[in-house]
Amino acid sequence: MNYQDFYNNSIQDPAGFWKEQSDALEWFKKPQTILSKDQHDYYQWFHDGELNLSYLCIDKHIKDGFGSQTAIIYDSPVTQTKQHITFNEFHDEVAKLAGGLQTLGLQKGDTAIIYMPMIPQAIYAMLACVRIGVIHSVVFGGFAPNELAIRIDDCQPKAVITASSGIEIQRIIPYKPYVDEAIKLANHKPQNVIVFNRNLNAEIPKQDYDVDYQTLVENAVPSEAVSIPSTHPSYILYTSGTTGKPKGIIRDTGGYATALKFSMKYIYGVEPGDVYWAASDVGWVVGHSYIVYAPLINRNTTVLFEGKPIKTPDASTFWRVISEHRVKVMFTAPTAIRAIKKEDPNGKFLKKFDMSCLKYQFLAGERCDVATLKWTEEKLQVPVIDHWWQTESGWPMLANMAGLELQDVQPGSAGFPVCGYDIQILNEEGQEVASSSEGYVAVKLPLPPGTLMNLWGNPERFKSGYLEKFPGYYFSGDGGYKDEDGYVFITGRVDDIINVAGHRLSTAEMEEIVASHKAVAECAVFGVHCDLKGQKPLGLVVLKAENNDSEEDIQKQIIQDVRHEIGAVASFRDVLVVDRLPKTRSGKILRKLLRNIADEMSYNIPSTIDDPEIINEITAVYKINQIGIHKNLTSHE
Ligand code: COA
Ligand code: AMP
């Protein structure tokens, strides 16, 4: 079937379409009710079905005779380790860890936080949780203890599963002291912290609540996969919102499994048995869906890569992994490609490897600039497919559905709506705009299976944040337009969220931290263009008339505060001191104007501006501090 007909079917008859797709899974109890409403009057999928994600990712394949197939290739240039883990071995690890969690009293409906680096035990922990109905919440290792504490208080885990350390470029990150500090900061106290010791000489302070991972697993009785209702949450994944408090996206079980299985075949074009690699981190949605659940449900071999695109050891590492493990489809963020391109602009490293196994290169996580797309196409000589989605959706919303019908790539566009997503570009009044006109990107309800169910403990925020702006639609928070041929272009967030190296961060949260510095009278934090990371945060501060420290010390303290509160991942390195900020006559700071001046885009001076002269002042400060696209471009030439 061609894309258009298949897509039309999915929109005209969502229940019929997704019922058929759900048949690709092995359910413990097949659903009779396909699409219905929950207690919040929101859509839910396969309400009376029962299944188990851990069973689908592991046991089913063993039952089908594939126990000796490699499930996970762990490739860690930072520890010089390579490990091939079969489905049989995977089963033993996960079943025993699940049994161990049960001995600690964890049961269906409890929550557990997983704060781990990119090691197989992180995947074991996720699958051990869903095996027994424990709802996991993985927290990215680059977040600071304060962020971990916020998540502990929000989802109230019975246990935290962690490892002794992560490894960044030439630096060991000790996780256990961070976990202890987070627990100290949090009001909720988990009963246990399960620690996997990597033996990398990291500091592992001991606490009464500690449990040794290996001992727990060795002494455990393996646990079977229990039957879980389709609408039982499989996980909570926190993502940045427009306030300091992150949003706990809740994912269901049956809808998620159905959507992921569908996506592997029709979007990514992979068959069971193929090797698939998403170079992300299990702490992000890409990691959840495309390092862990989708490839494993689809019986692909998934690559778990603990390293960076560069410096581990160099810019050839991605090509080495693809070639060595015979990766068929790879997925990464444009930032990673830009980093490689900067180190190896002519792609000389590529020539060392046999890349004939690679069929498609997918990109997502941030806007893909045309230069990056073109470079990747030219060097890899395979279709390079930009696709768009969010933590909320859990799987792609816009793509070139290569497995169904590969369309021509239109540089700058993330492709066409994926089956199940009725994507419309709306104006402020909620009416569809003409083609090529920019507007808000919204999706007509119901969303397909696999998308967010609600926000953990906050159904009001779910409604107000996503459903109320355009009644009958899900509002994505992104702006964009559709061209005459139906290609959709995402132009960026319309709120206080930025994407730094494909990592989603809230500038509002950073601004709260900057504003709380004792020397700061007022401030604005917003995203500006960055040649490498796509965007980076920039803070402008007006200082109080009297303070004891020098400007330079204050700048350093502010940068340190953000790093301490949010984590190194915030990449907050630029703070400029200004005499005043541009405001409207009613006192609202004009952040968009500040951003546009920095990016040297054409901008309109708002008629409501209090004093237009301030634009010259800000421009002068940017120039002195070399902020702006122009400077970045020339500095790399
Ligand atoms: N644990 C602890 N710290 C982490 C971390 C983790 N898991 N991940 C990142 N950090 C730290 C980094 O060490 C760095 O710290 P520093 O300020 O002390 O140097 C900081 O957070 C910023 O990290 P990052 O944005 O990754 O920048 P980098 O300079 O270390 O690397 C790139 C630059 C381009 C190589 C890197 O950003 C990259 O690989 N980007 C692609 C990201 C990606 O795949 N995203 C997809 C998500 S879907
Ligand atoms: P996250 O929830 O971390 O996956 O971030 C989602 C946000 O990243 C989206 O709302 C977009 O702003 C941005 N994004 C993700 N993929 C793309 C893409 N292919 N093109 C443009 N923006 C993207």
Image: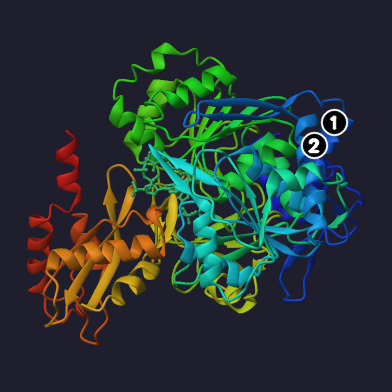
Residue 579: x and y in percent read: 11, 75
User: Which comes before the other along the chain, label 1 or label 2?
Assistant: 1
Residue 62 disc label? 1
At x 73% / y 56%, what residue is drawn?
234
Name the image quarter holding residue 344: top left
On screen, residue 473 versus residue 524, left or right, reads right
Quarter of the picture containing the N terminus is top right
Residue 385 disc label? none
Above or below, 167 against 610 in this view is above
On screen, residue 56 versus residue 177, left or right, reads right
On screen, residue 208 versus residue 180, left or right, reads right
Q: How many marks?
A: 2
Amino acid type, mark 1: Ile
Above or below, 170 against 116 in this view is above
Q: Secondary structure at mark 2?
A: helix
At x 24% / y 74%, what residue is drawn?
523
What residue does disc 2 label?
Answer: 91
